Structures are given as structure tokens and as C-alpha cells.
Image (cartoon, grey):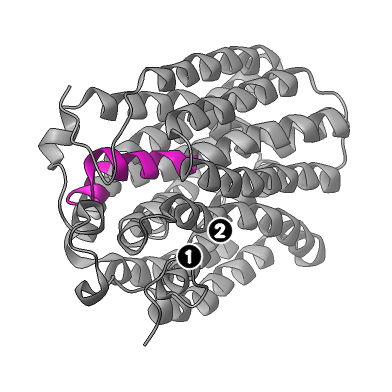
């Protein structure tokens, strides 16, 4: 019999959190290896950077298409039943990049399937389950889950670069895809489970299935503020993730140092996610969000003019703070404002904003480079946009615990 106290390390909710974090870690393979693969793919097949970046946009567009039906299924079937088949498909399809042909339609088809599969491995698949296990430590538990992506950012770029150096990008894709299946499927099967009603505090609506309906959530001003903030801030963040390595190497920085800068961004997002998770359990989450997005805006502005590894890495660290913090705040605020009744469905709708921005951002940056040979003007504009949407968080009303239905 395991303890029911969230403060105990033996509390079963922490095991569930660990399983979810590993899935998110593996899902981040797609995000953090794409910057490393961008130039090798463009050079081998004589494709423009905009053409290759479009593959990433295809991935996020397919994720946006699939995410709401997926959220609906998670609300009814649970995370485990969705995540396991998605992990298996993702690993197989990523490995199939090892036999990629010189046809753009082939590249886009592979990344379309990856976009569908990866959606079931992301925080959207697990946030409802994690939230049901935690009340006092919910922010920290969500932070640890989402931090799996940041750990991926530390590991995946360097691992991909090393594998490419040893055996080429095709062998690297095969090895990385196989690792997803070997590690991911048994881990999620073993640790992911819904919270038993026997240990649920039924007096706590946010730990049960009470809360706002999908219709009530979609009619809320609060919901659409969160949607707008996610979209506006994610354009710069997602575009930077995809093009950071190429941007730095264009400015005379070595490929290994550029990969290190990508890892530095991921390292910063780990710290930011854990710190943000701790902060939102203690302070009003909208204020915390404003702070981390302001840091991201400063980082985007610095990156526009970065000419050295040190300045590029500092910019990447600040952008990483924004990526990490905002990812924690959104599911936390959704659970506090609307409860868990339709949590996965509402969260999946907000994910459309992130996915849409992830489709637009890399393509905009690729087009800016192809047109002018520089990212500077676009990054400056994106810094202003990020700061502007951050200010919207200051307009959110206070929430009450355990949940508050917002109808305005």
C-alpha cells in the first residue's frame, strides 16, 4: 500500500509523473534533432531551407488537426491507451528517415505521420492524469512532466550530432527511432495509470471529473487569452528552435558549438520549468507567466544581433526560459479555472495555438533567410510580439482553488 501524501517520495503519483516525463523526453527528439538535420538534408538533396523547414510545419499542422480528437479520447479512455501505440508508430516512422528519397513529398509524408504520432506522446496526453494525482504539488508535477522535453534538448542535439559524425544522418535516424521504441513502450506500459477513485479526494472538484464543460470553456474570455498568448509567443520560440543551429553556423560558429547552444536552451528550459512549477504552486500563475515571457522577448531581441557563441548562447538561454515556463503555466491555469471534467479537450484546443505557431514560425524564418540572407529583422519583430502577448497575462482574473468556472 503506497502513501497518499503528495509530499512523500513513495507516493504513486510521482511514478506516474516519471513515466509521463520519459514519454515527453522521447517526443522532444523530433523538435531537437530537426535543427541538426536541417542543413544535412538541404545540402544532400539541394533543397532550400524554406522547403526543409516546411516539413516541420507539416508536422505541427498534422498535430493541430489530430489534437482535439485525441484530447476527447484521452478524457474518455485515459492516457495509457493512447500513448503506447503512438510511441510505437513514432519510433518506426522516425527510423524510416534512414531510407528517405530525394523527393520533397516523401519528406513531407514522413513528417505528417510523425506529427500525428507525436501528439500522443506530448504533455497534452498526460496532463489530465497528472493533475488528477496532485493538488498541493500539481504545479511541480506538471513541471517535472514537461521538463522531459528540456532534458531531451540537452541529450538529443549532441547525440544526433555525434551519430551523424560517426555514421551519417541516415544511420543516426535509424538508431534514434529504435531507441524510442525500446525505451518508451515498456516504460509507459509499466508506470502510466489513472488515479484510483479509492484514494481520490472526492471533496476536491479538481481531483475528480467536475468542472466546466467544453462549451463553457470555449465561451470564456480567459480561455481565449491563454490561446492568444500561446500563439503569439510560440512563433518566435518554435522558429528559433528550428533555425538556431543554422543561424549560428551562418555567423561563423562551429557546428558543435551551435549544437551546444541548442542544448543550453534546453538546459535553461529545465531550470525554468522546475522553478515555474514551484512558483505557480505559491503565487498567481499569470504573473509568473508574464515574467518568463518577458525573458524570452529579451532573448529573441539579443539573438537578432548575436555574432558570437557567447551572445548566441545567452540569447538561447533566455528564450529557453520562456519555452519552459509557459509550457507549465497553461495546463496549470486550465486546471484551476476549469477543473478536470473536460481538461484534455480544452488543453488540446490550446495546443492548436502552439502547433499553428510551430508551423508558421520556422517557415517565416526560412523565408526571411532565403529572401535576405538574414534573420535579424524578423527576430526583432518577433521579440516585440512576444512582449506584447506577455502583457495579456496581466489581464487574467484571480482564480480560486480548487477550480473556478469562468463565464466571462
Q: Residue at the far bottom: name it.
A: 1
Q: Residues within 10 Å of mark 2 (few under 14, many from 20)?
A: many
- The residue sitting at 46% across, 58% down in the picture is 141
Q: Which mark is residue 91?
A: none
- The residue sitting at 18% across, 32% down in the picture is 218
Name the quadrant containing residue 336.
top left
Residue wearing tag 2: 148
Q: Is residue 129 left or right of residue 153?
A: left
Q: Choose the circle earlier in sequence order: 2 or 1.
A: 1
Question: Are circles 2 and 1 on residues that touch, CB within 8 Å?
Answer: yes
Q: Is residue 310 left or right of residue 318?
A: right
Q: Is residue 204 above or below residue 268?
A: below
Label 1: state its secondary structure: helix
Q: Does 338 appear in magenta?
A: yes
Q: Position of residue 220 (x, y in %)?
A: 20, 27
Q: Residues within 10 Å of mark 1 (few under 14, many from 20)?
A: many
Q: Is residue 399 above or below residue 128?
A: above
Residue nearer the viewer, 376 or 78: 78
Residue nearer the viewer, 298 or 170: 298
**Magenta-drawn segment:** 327-346
Tell me the quadrant of the picture where the C terminus can be found: top left
Tell me the quadrant of the picture where the N terminus can be found: bottom left
Q: Which mark is residue 23?
A: 1
Q: Does 162 appear in magenta?
A: no
Which SS type dominates the magenta stretch? helix
Q: Position of residue 202 (x, y in %)?
A: 18, 63
Amino acid at each position: 500500500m503506497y502513501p497518499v501524501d503528495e509530499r512523500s517520495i513513495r507516493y504513486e503519483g510521482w511514478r506516474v509523473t516519471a513515466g509521463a516525463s520519459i514519454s515527453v523526453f522521447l517526443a522532444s527528439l523530433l523538435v531537437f534533432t530537426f535543427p541538426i538535420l536541417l542543413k544535412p538534408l538541404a545540402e544532400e538533396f539541394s533543397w532550400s531551407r524554406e522547403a526543409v523547414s516546411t516539413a516541420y510545419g507539416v508536422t505541427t499542422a498534422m498535430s493541430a488537426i489530430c489534437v482535439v480528437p485525441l484530447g476527447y479520447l484521452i478524457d474518455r479512455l485515459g492516457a495509457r491507451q493512447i500513448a503506447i501505440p503512438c510511441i510505437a508508430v513514432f519510433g518506426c516512422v522516425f527510423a524510416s528517415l534512414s531510407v528517405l528519397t530525394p523527393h520533397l513529398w516523401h519528406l513531407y509524408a514522413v513528417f505528417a505521420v510523425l506529427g500525428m504520432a507525436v501528439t500522443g506522446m506530448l504533455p497534452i496526453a498526460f496532463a489530465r492524469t497528472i493533475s488528477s494525482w496532485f493538488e498541493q504539488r500539481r504545479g511541480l508535477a506538471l513541471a517535472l512532466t514537461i521538463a522531459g522535453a528540456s532534458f531531451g534538448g540537452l541529450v538529443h542535439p549532441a547525440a544526433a550530432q555525434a551519430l551523424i559524425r560517426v555514421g551519417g544522418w541516415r544511420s543516426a535516424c535509424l538508431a534514434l527511432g529504435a531507441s524510442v521504441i525500446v525505451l518508451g513502450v515498456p516504460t509507459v506500459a509499466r508506470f502510466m495509470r489513472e488515479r484510483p477513485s479509492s484514494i481520490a479526494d472526492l471533496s476536491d472538484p479538481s481531483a475528480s471529473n467536475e468542472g466546466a464543460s467544453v462549451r463553457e470553456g470555449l465561451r470564456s474570455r480567459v480561455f481565449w487569452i491563454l490561446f492568444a498568448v500561446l500563439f503569439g509567443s510560440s512563433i518566435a520560440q518554435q522558429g528559433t528552435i528550428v533555425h538556431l543551429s543554422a543561424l549560428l553556423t551562418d555567423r561563423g560558429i562551429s557546428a558543435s558549438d551551435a549544437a551546444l547552444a541548442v542544448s543550453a536552451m534546453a538546459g535553461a528550459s529545465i531550470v525554468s520549468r522546475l522553478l515555474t512549477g514551484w512558483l505557480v504552486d505559491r503565487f498567481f500563475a499569470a504573473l509568473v507567466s508574464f515574467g518568463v515571457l518577458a525573458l524570452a522577448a529579451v532573448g529573441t531581441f539579443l539573438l537578432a544581433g548575436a555574432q558570437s557563441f557567447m551572445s548566441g548562447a545567452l540569447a538561447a538561454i533566455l528564450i529557453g526560459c520562456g519555452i519552459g515556463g509557459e509550457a507549465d503555466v497553461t495546463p496549470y491555469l486550465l486546471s484551476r479555472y476549469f477543473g478536470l471534467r473536460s481538461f484534455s479537450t480544452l488543453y488540446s484546443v490550446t495546443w492548436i495555438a502552439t502547433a499553428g505557431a510551430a508551423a508558421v514560425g520556422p517557415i517565416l524564418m526560412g523565408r526571411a533567410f532565403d529572401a535576405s540572407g538574414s534573420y535579424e529583422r524578423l527576430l526583432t519583430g518577433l521579440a516585440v510580439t512576444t512582449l506584447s502577448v506577455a502583457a495579456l497575462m496581466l489581464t487574467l482574473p484571480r482564480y480560486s482553488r480548487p477550480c473556478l468556472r469562468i463565464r466571462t
